[in-house]
Amino acid sequence: MGFDISALLNPKARPLLGLDISSSAVKMVELAANGKDGFRVERYTIEVLPKDAVSDGNIANLDSVVDCVRRAWKRMNTSTRNVAMALPGSAVITKKIIVPAGLRDDELEVQVEAEANQYIPFAIDEVNLDFQVIGPAPSLPDELEVLIAASKKERVEDRVAVADAAGLKAVVVDVESLASLSAYELIEPQLQDSGRNQVVALINAGANVMDLTVMRNGQQVYTREQAFGGAQLTQDITRHYGMSYEDAEAAKRAGNLPEGYEAELLNPFMESLALEVSRALQFFFTSTQFNQVDHIILAGGCAVIPGIDEVVATRTQVNTLIANPFADMVLSDRVRERSLLADSSSLMVACGLALRRFDPS
């Protein structure tokens, strides 16, 4: 699913890069087909953004973001210029609706637009609107369940403008949460019985926000967003060692901080993160009929911290894995396995976007 901002390319004819612009970094992933159902990781890169270049999902400093995207694309050393991008969930209104089965495409579009008018607090000509048929409605055989997504045009145009200015072409604009769920489908087979009839909590802990999405049998049953992320640890490093934010972020990523860092700053941060995960799960239990979670999958930049899965598992008493959507993929000679393993959890959105190349549409 993605806002139709240009004629969609034929995914089999031309490659496509997944381009994720988060609040802390630009991430790019390029995948290729490998056999009938497999994938090969052709190349990937992560380029750190200056502080506040992206704020609350908004492109706050266009030039800085464009420079970063350009550098990332150069490091990729690819001729591919078509990209799939994503908007943060906060910029998109999504709603599941029920429509009669058997509608022609043009009738379905009219019906979706009429329904969308009820849920979108903007004039319909101020938004980009898209929809995806999910399938037959539960317990209503003559009805279809359809997911509609709408975003103000300027939010889409901001992302497209970044790609254009960097010499790239945005052919798909998706939603970050939906891109993550595409990548999650590659992780499901790693769970016992491929996660069937199990409750799986996908935690995406980025620089500023922690997202919880709870899945059961491929269906999203709950979502929650809370303000907590890796930027808090960077701020702690800045204060503790008198470093600039950029130097603190670089030292954190490189792992070359003074002795005592783990005991004084890193371990308390990991405990705080585990506590936030535990709180998010408590909110889930109190607001749904569920009272347990079978697996936690940690994604996002915070999930790259060595040992974070054990700290979360100890606090929550739930089996915890680090997200790796690339586990069953073949790697090209350009990709170092050890580096990809360390970075995989922070590449969920970029991987999900790169998968758009293989959409049948």
Image: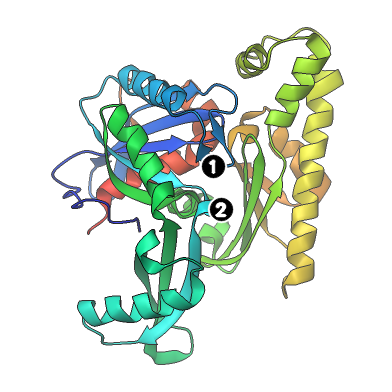
The residue that disc 2 covers is 90
In the rendering, at what x and y percent does residue 312 appear?
75, 42
Circles 2 and 1, Cβ within 8 Å, touching? The answer is: yes
Report the residue that reaches farthest toward the left.
13
Q: Is residue 230 left or right of residue 259?
A: left
Image quadrant where residue 350 sits: top left
In the rendering, at what x and y percent does residue 53 appear?
53, 28
Residue 129 in view (yes/no): no
- Taking 151 as reference, is 51 above or below it? above
Quadrant of the rendering where the N terminus is positioned: bottom left
Q: Secondary structure at mark 2?
A: helix
- Taking 144 as reference, is 191 above or below it? above
Residue 298 in view (yes/no): yes
| Residue nearest the observer in this picture, 211 or 358 | 211
Give me the disc on residue 57: 1
In the rendering, at what x and y percent does residue 270 appear?
77, 33
